[in-house]
Amino acid sequence: MIDSKSREAMTTACSHGGIYSVNPRLVTADFSSNVNPLGISGNALKAIQKSISKLSSLYPDPKCIDLKKGILNYLDIGLKLECVCVGNGATEIIHDFARAFIRNKALIPAPTFCEYEIASRRMGANILFIPLKDMILNTELIIEQAKKQDAIFLCNPNNPTGLLSTTAIKKIVESIDSSTKVMIDECFIELVDGHDNQKYSMINKINEFDNLVILRSLTKSFGLAGLRVGYSVCNPRLASRLSANRITWNVNGVAQMAAIAALKDTSHLANARAVIKKERKYMQHRIEKKMQNFTPCKSDVNFFLIHLKRKNSIKVRDSMLTKSGVLVRDCSTFTGMGHEYIRVAVKKHKENVILLDAMELVDNR
């Protein structure tokens, strides 16, 4: 039984960005959430507009069959329908994974996405955090400690640090016993630079490793944050266990329709990646050349960390918000990080200029 004090700690342990992390009325530009800078796919928006009247008065398909077929067509790697689980956002699947596979212990590299921690703690698990070394996985220590764990969470690209070594991740998966389940969160993988970004993915390995679950999200890739659609792929046996506690109608009909349409619009992703690469280069160059107290960290995806010199991350966030209406992600709430970093999303050019102007105001104080 989890006592009230522990339950309260769990509910406050996980902090996210987004306008509701602060007073939303103050936010005019949100750089704390890492979603597709182009927003929702035009095809997805048209599908919603065409069908919303009908969909709003019908119960959705509780098994998400058409959406699962759309995911399989999109991935095009020869998977069966039974390999796919669909969730109300990727976060739901993280918690399904914890309920299915975690009983006593979980291993989590840090810093990383905090929902792994809260999902594990809800199962009463003891969590072993393995700190990143210079933003790199401590591969040997993870492998050594994995023998004692029910599950391991790996995030690639890692939130908030960016792309990790695929070689290191593959070595971890190959080296641990199959009794230890591994979730690899690839929710940002489609927004990594280049058309061949799937070379960083482990999704082709699910038939090779029977303890592996790959997590993806249409929230990030296709800008469906408000509609909440995520999915996982794994072998059918694991998928069945993942779905065992799933509530009926967990993904609403509008979200299913939008996701099906979005997955067909691969040009939307290509356009977004081009914008991200160009704009991130512009943003980082301007920060490096014009600012004294901000140092951008290397990134290959649609967000990057900024190291603060002689600045406090909470004070920087609050100052930018109150003076300019610009919200950045204070990273002090990530396990293993102090007050020396903020994280910013890469958006379209006009929005990025607003961010950089706001940063310069804080930098010059």
Image: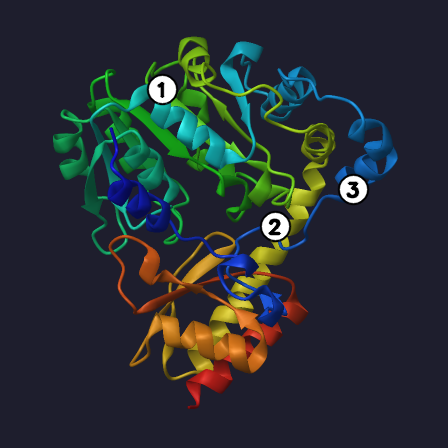
User: Which of the pair 143/45 is nearer the observer?
Assistant: 45
Decide: marks 3, 2 in contact (CB < 8 A)?
no
What residue did someone put label 3 on? 45
Sequence-earlier tag: 3 or 2: 2
Return the x and y of residue 4 as percentages of the image width and height.
28, 41
Q: Residue 36 — which label?
A: 2
Sequence-earlier tag: 2 or 1: 2
Q: Could you tell me the amino acid type at mark 1?
A: Ala
* SS type, badge 2: loop
- Frontmost of labels 3 and 2 is 3
What residue did someone put label 1 on? 100
- Frontmost of labels 3 and 1 is 1
Residue at the outermost bottom position: 365
Return the x and y of residue 8 as percentages of the image width and height.
32, 46
Q: Could you tell me the amino acid type at mark 3?
A: Leu
User: Which of the pair 45/301 is nearer the observer?
Assistant: 45
Q: Quadrant of residue 108?
A: top left
All told, the count of numbered labels is 3
How crowded pointer 3 is (Cα within 10 Å; few <14, some 14-19, many 20+) is rated as: some
Marks 3/2: CA distance? 14 Å
- Frontmost of labels 2 and 1 is 1
Image point 37% across, 64% down: which residue?
297
In this rendering, the answer to whether 72 lies above or below 306 is above
In this rendering, the answer to whether 173 lies above or below 109 is above
* SS type, badge 1: helix
